[in-house]
Amino acid sequence: MNHHFNNNKFMQMKNLLFVAMIGATMSLAACGDNNEPELPSSETEVSETEMTVSGTWKAGSEIKLGRHLVVPEGESLTIEPGVKIIVSTAGVGINHTPIEVIVKGNLYVLGSEEQPVYFTVDESKRTATNIFAGLWGGIIATESCQEMVIDHAVIEYTGGQVIEGSPSATSGIYTAGDDAYPQITTTNINGKYVITNSIIRNGWSDGIYLMGGSAIISGNTFAANGYSGAEAVNIKAGVKADIAGNIMFSPNTNGLKLSSSGQSETRGQAVANAYNNTIINAGWRRDGEKGGCVYVEKNCLANVVNNLMVNCKFRAMTPNYKNPNSSDAGYDDKSVIDHNMYVSGTQKSPIVYPEESNVAYAFEGYNYEHKSYNPAVDSHSVIATADNLVNPGFFNFDINAVGLTDYVYNPAWDFHLSADSPALGVTSASVTPCFAGGLEINGKLYHSPALEPHFGAYGAK
């Protein structure tokens, strides 16, 4: 029972009015035979700016969301396979505040391979010109969110600007005028989060921004994350995460930014295991010398192994590595960032910064004398040179054909490896995932993937 209701007659009448509002004014539609919204009426409340919901959204429903969606503290919302949440791009109120999905309780998005759950916009808005338009505010798990699972979902066209009156600005999660919404945000250092088998694409800001919690991020495809800065996955202090088996195509800056920024006595050191990921075209849309594929800073303890970097601008960086174990700058020198493979095509970037690195080809960036290249990092990795570009032989992706600044993902691509690929048979790396024994959420045990003996997300097909 939603905590906004009690059993007196007034509240029962109010409840009926809310149901009527949902059917008549909230533009909430379902795809069932009777065309009635399949929402638990006693657990839904509508106000001028918010819709508060717990319970279950039934398989195949279509929800047209014209208000902020709130899952209340202490309650849960389960979203079944095939549900489509169509978010209005008009925003909320006279300021047109980008719509947020605000998770104060628990959220269980349980799609399937055949019927994923969609968080998207109207079909007419799903265009190439809107890839970085930032049409809504994304999913925000607040400090009271205990659990969240996002399994087989598509989350797209997020990244609206945070403005005065935005719920996340009012609550202090983001800053009005300075921030744009990632697709997914977490904040609770005691929360448990699994994001798996999903597509996270077409966002103005980061794909996943973890400011707290225990997380498994596995088997996802990221594409076109970040218009001006931002990463596919960005973590801060208070996070323990296993990030494995993901495809990350054309993040603006890095596929992985692993930082312990914000570390304190109450917010612990960030710990990240990132392995068997394939990162493509990272860093070319970012000016300066910061972006490239992996960025480890501010005392993060990171194990980054068996990853496959394809046509990225730079190698893995640990800025100010001569000052390790410092909350101000360095990485934790117990980290292992090694046994990765960097491959290069022959394409030249159409964006070159002569006043900075002047790097125009991936192999140039890999061999550039970068101030953040640590001699202890990638000392055993395979690194392409002008004389040896190291083609991994993908099943269906030509490393010489896709432009370095391209960001539109082709679903026909297949990043499995050919039987004779040099990326197969890696055995020297090791990593112990944080959650090899499992992370229990909503009565189910989710396991981090085991380290696979090859570079990248996929082995041979």
Image (tube, rainbow, N blue to C red):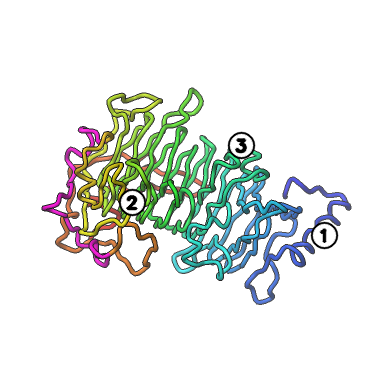
Q: Do the residues labelled 3 and 2 touch (CB within 8 Å)?
A: no
Query: Bounds of the magenta span?
Result: 373-401
- Residue 461 in view, yes or no: no
Which residue is label 2 attached to?
284
Of labels 1 and 3, the one closer to you: 3
Tell me the amino acid under the disc marked 3.
Answer: Gly
Name the element at disc 2: loop
**Nearest to N terminus: mark 1 or mark 2:** 1
Residue 100 left/right relative to 26: left
* Residue closer to the observer: 406 or 297: 406
User: Is residue 391 covered in magenta?
Assistant: yes
Residue 148 left/right relative to 242: right
Residue 422's spot in the image, x, y percent?
Answer: 15, 55
| Distance from the alpha carbon under mark 1 to that under mark 2 | 53 Å
**Mainly helix, strand or loop, the magenta region?**
loop
Of labels 1 and 2, the one closer to you: 2
* Mark drawn on residue 17: 1
Is the residue 333 above or below the residue 109 in the image? above
Which residue is label 3 attached to?
172
- Residue 23 in view, yes or no: yes
**Mark 3 surroundings within 10 Å by alpha-carbon count, few (fewer than 14), some (14 through 19), many (20 or more):** few
